[in-house]
Amino acid sequence: MVGDIRVQAEPFDYGAECAAFAARARGAGAVVTFLGLVRDDGGRLARMEIEHYPGMTERALEKIAEEAAGRWPLSACLVLHRHGSLSPGEPIMMVATASRHRQAAFAAADFLMDYLKSRAPFWKKEFGADGAAWVAARDEDEAALTRW
Amino acid sequence: MIDLLYFAWVRERIGLPRERVETTAATVMDLIEELKAREDRYQAAFADLRALRVAVDQELADFSAPLSGVREVAFFPPMTGG
């Protein structure tokens, strides 16, 4: 499996990434992609800052991708996550998976999302009209891991 | 010598992102007790351990994890990626 893990401050072009991934995944049969955007919370959010743990972040994402590849027959997978200052509507992260059949590609993408929400060292701080606050982890996100 | 790293509100409460400490603590929990005894800002950061997570040499660990041979310990709140 070809795993592509990227942690970056720079914006990314979702369309271009999808096209490049699909080109690399030729012959896979199925490609699933997911894009996460900064919510605007009805205009209350001015910006978001994402902090991460350089070194551990990449290791954690690689481990999660390897785990996914061990569970489903993936021919390629991409995890791209940004850090730094982001505005509402901006892409935060994306995952892409390629497999022979769509069920494996969907399941692996869902698994990657669940795990990177609570097992990859990222922290979000929201800045808005009401001031700044760290986003609290949700119990549902932790509970979602028991699905797998 | 162990490098300590702090992230998110743990970093804000302690007031620095990282520091190097000389310690004889046998476990993460012992290290936390040492830090809490140092200053109020550590007390504030480590007041509720249920709200904290720890990584030892960049792997998630328990508070009972041993520190022998460890180079880096990081403290942070539950992660909120995605």
Image (cartoon, coloured by chain):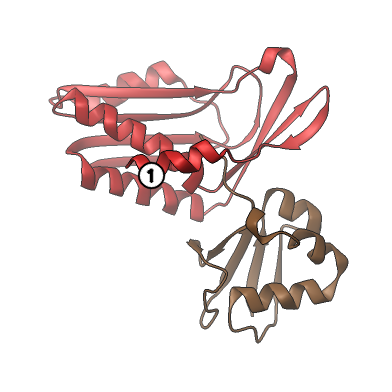
Residue under label 1, please give it: A146
**Which image quarter: residue A105?**
top left
Residue B51 relative to residue A118: left or right: right
Q: Quadrant of the N terminus of chain A?
A: top left
Q: In which quarter of the image is the C terminus of chain A?
A: top left
**Residue in the image at 50% along x and 55% along y:** A56
A49 w.r.t. B75: above or below: above
Residue A107 seen: yes
**Residue in the image at 80% along x and 55% along y:** B13
Q: Which chain is brown?
A: B
Q: Where is residue A22 in the image (x, y as percent from the top left)?
A: 26, 22
B64 w.r.t. A25: above or below: below
Along the viewing direction, whichever of B30 and A85 lies nearer the viewer: B30
Q: Which chain is red?
A: A
Going by the numbered disc 1, the residue's amino acid type is Thr
Q: Residue furthest bottom?
A: B24
Q: Position of residue A50 (x, y in %)?
A: 63, 38
Q: Residue furthest right?
A: B40
**Residue in the image at 40% along x and 16% along y:** A15
Number of marks drawn: 1
Residue A6 seen: no
**Residue in the image at 36% along x and 51% along y:** A63
Q: Position of residue A55 (x, y in %)?
A: 50, 55
Judge the density around disc 1: few (<14), some (14-19), many (≥20) Cα neighbours within 10 Å.
Answer: few
Give SS at disc 1: helix
B7 w.r.t. A122: above or below: below
